[in-house]
Each structure stands twice: as C-alpha cells, then as structure tokens.
Image (cartoon, helix red, strand yellow):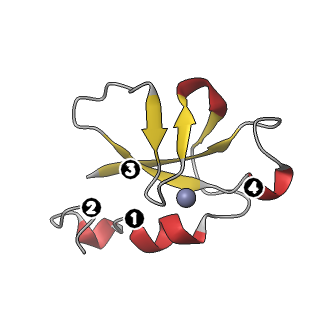
Amino acid sequence: MTVYIARPLPGTVGESRRVVHVFPLSAEGLAPERLTAYCGATFGRGELELLERPVGMPCVTCLRLAPTPGDADRPAIDR
Ligand SMILES: [Zn+2]
C-alpha cells in the first residue's frame, strides 16, 4: 500500500484546518475526482498541496489510521 501526504491549499480552508492528511494511492495510480484521506476528509483534486515529506501540523486521525511502513502486508484499514 502506497500512501502520500497532502494538505489543503491556502485559502481552501481556514489556516487552523490546514493539517497534513494521509491518502491511500490507488494501485492504478489514477487520480480520482475526489480524494479521501484516511480520516474521512475529502478534497477535490485542485484543493490539495502534495508534500514530499511531513511539514506543519499532521492530522492526528490520519496518523492513527494510516498504515505504517511496517504494515505493508496488512490492509490499509483493518478494523
Ligand atoms: Zn486526516
């Protein structure tokens, strides 16, 4: 499971809500119209700033739900 991180672009949400979310990358690599983070937040394709590495404030819910590198063989969401 590959994941990527992104946060809302400035102006799309309030500054306090510009946290870094974690998103599952689909196996096809096709960007869907709506991107859903592990925490359930959804964004349009043009509303996100993709990040190379974590910066700023992370989304705590995403961090809790997203797979860690050691979980590569486990389904992303297994509850
Ligand atoms: Zn999130």
As rendered, which of 44 and 28 lies closer to the eye? 44
Q: Amino acid at mark 4?
A: Arg
Q: For numbered disc 2, what is the local secondary structure?
A: loop
Q: Are marks 2 and 3 in contact (CB under 8 Å)?
A: yes
Q: Single out the mark in the foreground, 2 or 3.
A: 2
Mark 2 vs mark 4, CA separation in Å: 24 Å
Q: Which residue is mark 4?
A: 17
- Left or right: where does residue 64 sit relative to residue 77? right
- Relative vertical location of residue 3 with respect to residue 61 in this rendering, above or below: above
Q: Earlier in the sequence, mark 2 or mark 4?
A: 4
Q: Amino acid at mark 1?
A: Ala
Answer with mark 2 or mark 3, whichever residue precedes in sequence.
3
Residue at image coords 56%, 54%: 21
Report the Cα–Cα distance between label 4 and label 3: 21 Å
Q: Position of residue 8 (x, y in %)?
A: 68, 42
Relative to residue 76, is residue 63 drawn left or right? right
Q: Is residue 7 left or right of residue 64?
A: right
The residue that mark 2 highlights is 76
> As shown in the figure, which amino acid type bears the numbered disc 2?
Ala
Q: Which residue is mark 1?
A: 66
Residue 31 on image: x %, y %: 39, 26
Q: Which of the two discs, 4 and 3, sits closer to the camera?
A: 4
Q: Earlier along the polypeptide chain: callout 3 or callout 1?
A: 3
> Disc 4 or 3, which lies upstream in sequence?
3
Q: Is residue 37 above or below residue 29?
A: below
SS assignment at label 4: helix
Q: Nearer the viewer, mark 2 or mark 4?
A: 4
